[in-house]
């Protein structure tokens, strides 16, 4: 019997991913979530160096397309990444020095990094001090920290509770831009995305913000104002409100309503141009700057304040002296929220932790949280009968003032606030702290592990005391 011929080719033990082309690797990665692509790309230096950054960038971009489709479709104005960052206008997204003028950041990009299957990590209360191999040579822009392979998130949340506990249903789209780029990005929001400006979102009494501490003393040095945008309704009619200057309800789909959007926008811009002049209207509701500078580039500025209840896009506009949109990300309270996309690529801070569903509170805000928790735990409240509401409110009012005044001047300075403050500013600072704890609660419910949260901070976030009545 003649001997069997050996089949030509490599033996199974010698088959490796290293021998695959980038196209084949990209095809494999197209079926994986970004955390899995990260683990694959960083499993070996031989694989990581030639292909890792590009594979991960492609994975994140695919995921961003899915996230935007989900958010925008739910809010009735489906638009894409291409609408926000059109290829034909790429040169407008950067200045002559290559600094980004427009970036997408916040919860939408966080969802991209975590992937669609992320449902929380196991919280065992122990610090992870493990070390792994590092990749620190000639990295692409998105590699903002040394890379090492991470363990995949542990799905510790009961499946029946995942949709509720790890809910992103209230996530919005945060766009950060320089002063000079604001008219350009507004044009895209109006013409390509089908949105309408619905006012400003820049004070403590306007809910739904996705940044903490922006009562705007904390970010006063670089942030000018924040605008909210909503989808234009296609069904129903307006409701008559005297200050909207309409005599009858208008069909949202009508040409008359479209004309009113332009008129209201022009009126808002005109009021801004008149501020400071003799006989000008009171700037009480206008100082924060909706539509400035310049309205929308080469098109009408569309404005309807009554749509702000359905806002889902926020445009964060920097002050004129800020020439790099990345500067606006420094005021986030959680490191993971600094994940961003600039039209060309993604920046992922602390990628090993981010892709594993872990993050930290940024130092200055952690100091405020730590001192707030310690002061709160020391307070001794005088008990009163439950039906004496006024007494309880007064008692809580006094305790709250003592609590905030007990936070050190150094801690307040760390978030851009001065050492002394009036009663009005006291209220704002209390709301500043409340926003910090709200975000701790929100992102913990979304399944993230906040590794440096002060002791008892997450417990207090679950039942943060509301402001006293009448504030």
Image (cartoon, grey):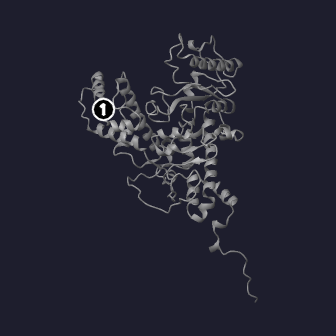
Q: Residue at x 65, y 58 (%)?
A: 28
The residue lying toward the viewer, choosing from 315 and 180, is 180
Crowd tier of the residue under label 1, counting other residues whose Cα lies within 10 Å: few below 14, some 14–19, many 20 or above = some
In this view of the protein, which residue sits in the foreground, 214 or 320?
320
Q: Nearer the viewer, residue 409 or 322?
A: 322
Q: Which quarter shows the N terminus?
A: bottom right
Quadrant for residue 45, please give it. bottom right
Measured as percent of width and height from the top left, residue 156 is found at 46, 52
- Residue 459 visible in rendering: no
Secondary element under disc 1, as helix, strand or loop, is helix
- Residue identifier under label 1: 405
Residue at x 59% of width, y 56% of height: 37
Q: Is residue 208 visible?
A: yes
Q: Is residue 6 left or right of residue 373?
A: right
The residue located at (62%, 20%) in the rendering is: 265
Q: Quadrant of the C terminus?
A: top left
Dividing the picture into quarters, in which one does residue 263 lie?
A: top right
- Residue 101 screen position, x and y as percent: 60, 38
């Amino acid at each position: 019997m003649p001997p069997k011929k050996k089949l030509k080719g490599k033996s199974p033990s010698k088959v490796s991913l290293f021998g695959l082309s980038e196209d084949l690797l990209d095809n494999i990665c197209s079926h994986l979530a970004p955390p899995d692509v990260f683990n694959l790309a960083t499993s070996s230096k031989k694989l990581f160096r030639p292909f890792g950054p590009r594979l991960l960038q492609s994975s994140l971009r695919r995921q961003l397309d899915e996230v935007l489709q989900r958010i925008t479709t739910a809010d009735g104005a489906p638009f894409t990444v291409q609408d926000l960052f059109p290829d034909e206008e790429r040169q407008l997204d950067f200045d002559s020095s290559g600094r980004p003028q427009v970036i997408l950041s916040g919860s939408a990009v966080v969802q991209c990094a975590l992937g669609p299957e992320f449902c929380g990590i196991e919280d065992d209360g122990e610090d992870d001090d493990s070390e792994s191999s590092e990749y620190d040579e000639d990295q692409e822009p998105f590699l903002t920290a040394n890379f090492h392979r991470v363990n995949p998130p542990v799905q510790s949340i009961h499946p029946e509770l995942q949709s509720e506990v790890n809910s992103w249903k209230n996530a919005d789209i945060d766009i950060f831009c320089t002063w000079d780029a604001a008219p350009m990005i507004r044009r895209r929001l109006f013409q390509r995305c089908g949105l309408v400006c619905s006012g400003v979102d820049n004070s403590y009494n306007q809910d739904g913000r996705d940044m903490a501490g922006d009562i705007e003393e904390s970010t006063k040095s670089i942030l000018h104002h924040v605008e909210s945008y909503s989808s234009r309704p296609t069904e129903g009619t307006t409701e008559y409100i005297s200050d909207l200057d309409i005599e009858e309800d208008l069909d949202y789909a009508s040409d008359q309503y479209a004309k009113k959007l332009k008129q209201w926008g022009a009126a808002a811009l005109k009021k801004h141009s008149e501020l400071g002049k003799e006989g000008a209207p009171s700037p009480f509701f206008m100082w924060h700057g909706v539509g400035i500078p310049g309205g929308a580039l080469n098109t009408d500025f569309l404005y309807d304040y009554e749509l702000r209840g359905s806002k889902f896009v926020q445009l964060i506009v920097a002050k004129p002296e800020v020439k790099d949109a990345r500067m606006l990300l420094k005021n986030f309270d959680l490191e993971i929220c600094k994940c961003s996309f600039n039209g060309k690529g993604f920046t992922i801070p602390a990628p090993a932790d981010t892709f594993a569903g872990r993050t930290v509170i940024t130092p200055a805000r952690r100091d405020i949280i730590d001192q707030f928790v310690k002061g709160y735990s020391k307070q001794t409240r005088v008990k009163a009968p439950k039906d004496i509401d006024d007494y309880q409110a007064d008692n809580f009012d006094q305790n709250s003032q003592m609590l905030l005044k007990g936070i050190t001047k150094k801690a307040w300075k760390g978030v851009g606030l001065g050492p002394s403050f009036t009663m009005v500013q006291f209220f704002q600072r209390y709301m500043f702290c409340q926003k910090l704890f709200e975000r701790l609660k929100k992102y913990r419910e979304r399944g993230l592990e906040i590794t440096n949260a002060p002791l008892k901070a997450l417990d207090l976030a679950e039942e943060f005391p509301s402001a006293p009545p009448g504030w």
